[in-house]
Amino acid sequence: MAAAERCSAVCLLTGESMKLYGKGLVNIKLIIVWVLAVYFLVDSIVRSLRSNFNFGMLIMYAITAGLWVYGLFHRQIDAFCAAGVGRVLRIGFFCGVGVFCALLAFVALSGYTDQPQGDEKAVVVLGAGLRKDVPSKLLVCRLEKALEYHEENPDAVIVVTGGQGPGETIPEGVAMAKWLAERGVPEEQIIVEDKSTSTEENLLFARRLLEERGIAATEPIVVVTNAFHCYRGGEYARMVGFTDVDALPASIGLNSIMPCYFREVFAVLYYWVFKSSRTGWMLQFVGIF
């Protein structure tokens, strides 16, 4: 009898301990959710004031909203996801997160697969937005990398690409050419492309301008962009007719990593489905990608 009572007491204590342990995990989870919710909210507000709107920012807003909704209604959401349709949706959600993380890894690693040889005939620098007439931090990173390459291979012409987008007072290509010229690149070495609205058009119009200069699409070129963007940059370069393409990944600021990489996952998926950025249901939104 005493043994049975001791066994019951142990079971009771174990059950209570598990309940307390479970509550502790829930509390830790909520603390993490709220810390992230506040961080993403502040980050989104600051980013909205400092940057032009783009799809990456939209993703950040969606994550912020999701964290706040879960933080406020976690009991109802956890109860709904415990069984039935809610459980299926929860499994689907975490599977989706897993796929998204795998794509993030692909985007991160693919920027370092086709390194230039240093003897390319041309450098194509892809645009990345202006603040009125000043290159964005992302674009400055690309320009710095192009300048670095120019110092090693000064014979290569540099094509700066990008039209004029919302909130910009001059075309990106013009601002990029000015930035390079101010740092010693001879103007005769710079070709300005100032009509494009997407990565694909950057490269298509650059190819035409290079052909006018006597540089065929079969000549080796290097595409300069940020690491997250190198995969699509290389793929679009081949799509528009370049046959010998290498990519030179530029650095990226820490505060730009999340929105840029998150956005690029969707951009890569869009490329795999529609190939051309000039077709497909997202065509009307290509400017914010």
Image (spheres, grey):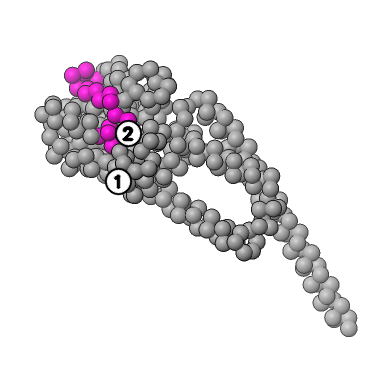
Left or right, residue 92 beside residue 22: left
Kind of residue indicated by mark 1: Lys
Q: Earlier in the sequence, mark 2 or mark 1?
A: 2
Whether tag 2 and tag 1 are in contact, CB under 8 A, the answer is no
Above-or-below relation of 56 to 88: above
| Furthest-top residue in this view | 182
Q: Residue under circle 2?
A: 198
Residue 121 found in image quarter? top left
Given residues 286 and 46, the one toward you in this image is 286
Q: Residue under circle 1?
A: 275
Above-or-below relation of 257 to 107: above
Q: CA distance from mark 2 to mark 1?
A: 13 Å
In the rendered image, is residue 289 in sight? Answer: yes
Residue plotted at (55% across, 42% down): 63
Left or right, residue 209 beside residue 64: left
Given residues 3 and 79, the one toward you in this image is 79
SS of the residue under disc 2:
loop
For the N terminus, the image quarter is: bottom right
Kind of residue indicated by mark 2: Ser
Residue 17: which disc?
none
Give the residues in magenta. Answer: 185-203
Say few, some or many: other residues with alpha carbon within 10 Å of mark 2 (under 14 / 14 to 19 / 20 or more).
many
Given residues 39 and 109, the one toward you in this image is 39
**Location of residue 194 in the rendering, given as x and y in whole percent from the top left corner:** 28, 24
Residue plotted at (41% across, 24% down): 166
Count the numbered circles shown: 2
In magenta stretch: residue 80: no
| Furthest-left residue in this view | 214
In the rendered image, is residue 148 in sight? Answer: no
